[in-house]
Image (cartoon, coloured by chain):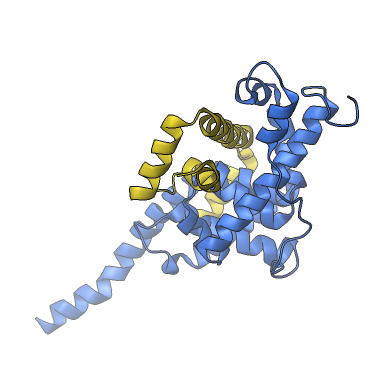
Amino acid sequence: MECDDCVRRLDQLIDRELSGLELEEVQHHLDGCGDCTKRYKFEEGLKRLVKVSCEQGHAPAELRERLRQILR
Amino acid sequence: MAVAAYAQIDWMPMTTVPDGQDAFAAEAITHLDALYRGALRLTRDPDQAQDLVQDAYARALRYQHSYQAGTNMKAWLFAIMRNLFWDRFQKGRPPALSIEDVGEFSLYDRMRDGVTEEGPEDTVLDRIAAGEVVEAIEKLSPLHREVVLLVDVEGFAYKDAAQILGVPIGTVMSRLHRARQHLQKSLYDYAVESGIVPGMGRSA
């Protein structure tokens, strides 16, 4: 596998959407390629940053109470 | 026997409906924080977010018979909320094609060119504040925003995201890729403005 093929699959890799032979091939390439590994870690870190940034805060208490009434 | 069987059939719904409803409501409410945060990202307004979530739950309750117990309730609720968002807050169906294109843009490549000693993966992400990321997400077009929300924030698999959005998996993948490039471009602009990385070409 070449770097281009690996980079094309990075979205799927960080989203855990690769499996089987394709996943093995990408992992094998990453084992031997520092550039792609750095890129992969960066993309993965960015995905995590997006998740963490958006996971802060809770639904307002009054909304929760209104929904309890609706769902009763 | 026939009477007993009839009585049983007649009697079943009266007990199963309330029990089923309790279980439904109990599970539905566990997804409230996620739905509210999603609604905040979609509407970008706390009042509209509350309205959207409340309407989504009301609709979910009305259509709970179409929810199959044991399947992904969170995905089902997000689908309801997302459709309501487009019906009500965007006034119509999502456009078939997304808007302007930043072209191939890689934050990693820009960072690598701008940061010399350490790798960009070690330095830059740590310096970007959560608020900036949220702002960058809210700057995305709604079509891009919702796919980032589903896959990156909520961690839905492509197939679940595809079902929620009512598009093929390939569309989820291409939209997500575009969305990430827009997001990376915004974060890059922020990083340059705030001096996290030197601007390329202009300030040098």
Q: Is residue A25 above or below residue B73?
A: above
Can see residue B50?
no
Q: Residue furthest right?
A: B202
Q: Residue furthest front?
A: A2
Position of residue B104 in the picture relative to residue B5 (left or right): right
Q: Colour of chain A?
A: yellow
| Residue at 61 percent of width and 40 percent of height | A59
Counting from the top left corner in percent of width and height, residue B122 is at 61, 20
Counting from the top left corner in percent of width and height, residue A63 is at 63, 45
Counting from the top left corner in percent of width and height, residue A37 is at 51, 31
**Near-viewer residue (B50 or B70):** B70
Q: Residue furthest bottom?
A: B2
Position of residue B79 in the picture relative to residue B181 (left or right): left
Position of residue B143 in the picture relative to residue B102 (left or right): left
| Residue at 58 percent of width and 31 percent of height | A42
Quadrant in which the C terminus of chain B appears: top right
| Residue at 15 percent of width and 82 percent of height | B3
| Residue at 39 percent of width and 37 percent of height | A28
Q: Residue furthest top?
A: B117
Q: Colour of chain B?
A: blue
Counting from the top left corner in percent of width and height, residue B59 is at 56, 64
